[in-house]
Amino acid sequence: MQIHVINPNTTASMTDKIGACANRVAAESTRIHVSQPESGPVSIESHFDEAISAVGVLEEIRRGETLAMDAYVIACFGDPGLLAARELTRAPVIGIAEAGFHLATLISTRFSVVTTLSRTAIIAEHLLDQYGFGEHCRRVRATDLPVLELENPAGNAYQALLEECQRARDEDGIGAIVLGCGGMADLTERLTHDLQMPVIEGVSAAIKLAESLVSLGLGTSKHGDLAFPRPKPFAGRFADWGR
Ligand code: 5HY
């Protein structure tokens, strides 16, 4: 089984970290391909960043389709371009936010999300409502860490994240925590140990969900809104995207 993991931002160290996490949890028979768009923001921290990164995600899906991938993972907590990506393939496409939410509701009645900047918390709240998990999530908390602070080994990102998770554990009446950034993929075990509470990060969750769907022969439905886009000419820089 071949799974294409896409880091929608253009920071290679974060792409490597996400790839290492995916390889750590993937089944023996699963082959992980990891990539990032050639163009786009080094980190995704706003609606604007998301909109631009979504085009990069679609470029990577189009490339993956030429390599016959069995599934795709969008490894940014805003799940940028998720539905558009599903239109381009029969393979399952899993966003790490949606995957994290699904697993959290399987092991806890209520969970909280701990993410990066407070300005991106609203994006997670929109996704919770869009996916129908609003009732299950008690709170989306922000550490106000810029995304790339997670790439700074000398920084105090871990301590800031741990303290916000401790507040969530002690104040929100929850049974689990979902980490709100692909760049937190390598912190799960340590946080789980230090918090003594289930901590879920989306990259691992998405890999296991993708493997389950593929092994069940389930892919993106082509009936209804996720059918392939209707063929039409595209102008300008997207001219070769026309079908
Ligand atoms: C992410 N940004 O997972 C999101 C996190 C966020 O570049 N990778 C990013 O803050 O929404």
Image (cartoon, rainbow, N blue to C red):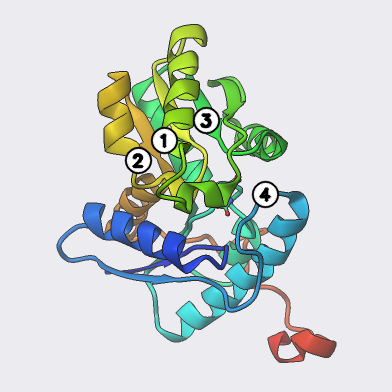
* Residue at which label 4 appears: 45
Q: Quick check: 205 above or below 238?
A: above
Q: Quadrant of the N terminus?
A: bottom left
Residues tagged 2 and 4 counted as in contact (Cβ below 8 A): no
Mark 4 and ligand 1: say if the CB distance to the nearest ligand atom is below 8 Å.
yes
Considering only order in the chain, which callout, 4 or 3, is on the residue closer to the N terminus?
A: 4
Residue 29, picture quadrant = bottom left
Tell me how far mark 3 sits from mark 1, CA to CA.
12 Å
**Residue at the bottom extreme of this rendering:** 240
Residues tagged 3 and 4 counted as in contact (Cβ below 8 A): no
Side of 185 where 65 appears, left or right? right
The local crowd at label 3, few if under 14, some if 14 to 19, many if 20 or more residues have their Cα within 10 Å, is many
Considering only order in the chain, which callout, 4 or 2, is on the residue closer to the N terminus?
A: 4
* Residue at which label 3 appears: 114
Tell me how far mark 3 sits from mark 4, CA to CA.
14 Å
In percent of width and height, residue 216 lies at 30, 55
Tell me how far mark 1 sits from mark 2, CA to CA.
8 Å
Side of 183 where 20 appears, left or right? left
Residues tagged 1 and 2 counted as in contact (Cβ below 8 A): yes
Tell me how far mark 2 sits from mark 4, CA to CA.
20 Å
The local crowd at label 2, few if under 14, some if 14 to 19, many if 20 or more residues have their Cα within 10 Å, is some
In percent of width and height, residue 210 lies at 36, 55
**Amino acid identity at mark 1:** Tyr
- Identify the secondary structure beneath mark 2: loop
Tell me the residue at 73%/83% (across/down). 231
Residue 92, picture quadrant = bottom left
Tell me how far mark 3 sits from mark 2, CA to CA.
12 Å
* Residue at which label 2 appears: 187
Q: Quick check: 8 above or below 67?
A: above
- Identify the secondary structure beneath mark 4: loop
* Residue at which label 1 appears: 158
